[in-house]
Amino acid sequence: MAGGSRSPGASVTSRVLAVLGAFDAAHPALTLSDIARRSGLPLATTHRLVAELVTGRALARGVDGTYRIGVRLWEIGLLSPLHGQLREVALPYLQELYTTVRENVHLAVRDGDEALYVEKVTGHRAVPTVSRAGGRLPLHATGVGKALLAYAPPEVIAAHLRGPLRRCTPYTITEPGRLARELAAIRDRGWARTHEEMTLGSCSVAVVVPGPDGTALAAIGVVGHSLGTAPQRLVPALRAAADQVAARLADEPHATQRATA
């Protein structure tokens, strides 16, 4: 048994990752027992690893006895190309776009079959959304996700269409054939849209940040209560922001790494 764990074949690294993976947006604070249960590790092993992670500031213990992700992981996370470089390059253009549209503005990349949200710019009058920086949502149910999926490699699209398509609202497209036609339409017109497909009452429009090879480096989207009968009116502003980000990234070749898992 690796490292004395009662989990055969589990390395120290895999056990540490299991502890950290016990936390998510729905579970930001956990007791020791919670961490052991969600990580699938013995309580004694969890206790030892958590103590070491607290010492290293990767976890923090609150006055109520629960644990949260610590500041050291936040510091390390800032070194990620997605956060530290892509975000920094895109943020001024996202902020400028927000001042124009006055609705939620998102920056996302594809990570497997999910849209990983890198940044979100919002205001107190913007519609509340389930998205958050660092959060993940289904590709097929979000504007940025559809845009990213439409410009993904053919084998990625095919695999996504074969997989289960989660129904988030009654309006979510879950039929593979219908989604395939929608993705083809996105490529034809150059922008994606959703209407209450992720959250009831919310609509979105999105475009991709193009890479030099024609694939999508990222996607930028706008989400609001209602984007009117002609959501394409937002496309010029979105496209201008995406093209500016793409130009800056081209000048900084190491500014981003596409997630292609």
Image (tube, rainbow, N blue to C red):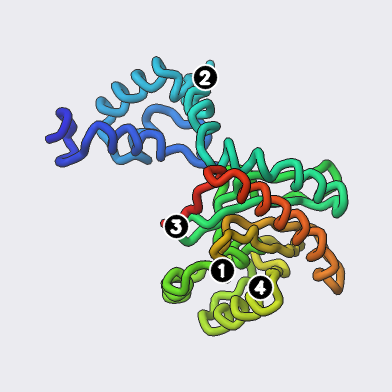
Q: Tell me the tag on residue 151.
A: 1
Task: Tell me what residue is drawn at x 81 percent, y 50 percent.
Answer: 97
**Could you tell me which secondary element the residue under label 4 belongs to?**
loop
- The residue wearing badge 4 is 171
Q: Residues within 10 Å of mark 2 (few under 14, many from 20)?
A: few
User: For the residue carrying disc 1, how many other residues have a C-alpha within 10 Å: few (<14), some (14-19), or many (20+)?
Assistant: many
Location of residue 245 in the rendering, given as x and y in whole percent from the top left corner = 69, 50
Distance of mark 4 from mark 2, alpha carbons?
41 Å
Chain-order first, disc 4 or disc 2: 2
How far across and down, in percent of the image, does residue 116 sit?
Answer: 55, 51
One can see residue 48 in this view:
yes
Q: Which residue is mark 2?
A: 62
Mark found first going from the N terminus, 1 or 3:
1
Badges 1 and 3: C-beta atoms under 8 Å apart?
A: no
Q: Is residue 68 visible?
A: no
Q: CA distance from mark 1 to mark 3?
A: 12 Å
Q: Is residue 103 above or below residue 62?
A: below
The residue to which callout 3 is attached is 260
Q: Amino acid at mark 2?
A: Gly
For label 3, the SS is loop
Helix, strand, or loop for circle 1? loop
| Quadrant location, the C terminus | bottom left
Of marks 1 and 2, the one in the foreground: 1
Judge by depth and name the residue closer to the eye, 1 or 72.
72
Give x and y (percent) for residue 240.
78, 58
Q: Label 1 vs label 2: CA separation?
A: 44 Å
Amino acid type at circle 4 is: Tyr
Q: How many other residues sit within 10 Å of disc 3, few (<14), some (14-19) or many (≥20)?
A: few
* Type of amino acid at the residue the image marks with label 3: Thr
- Mark with earlier residue (3, 4): 4
> Looking at the image, which residue is at 70% across and 69% down?
191
Question: Residue 231 sits in which quadrant?
Answer: bottom right
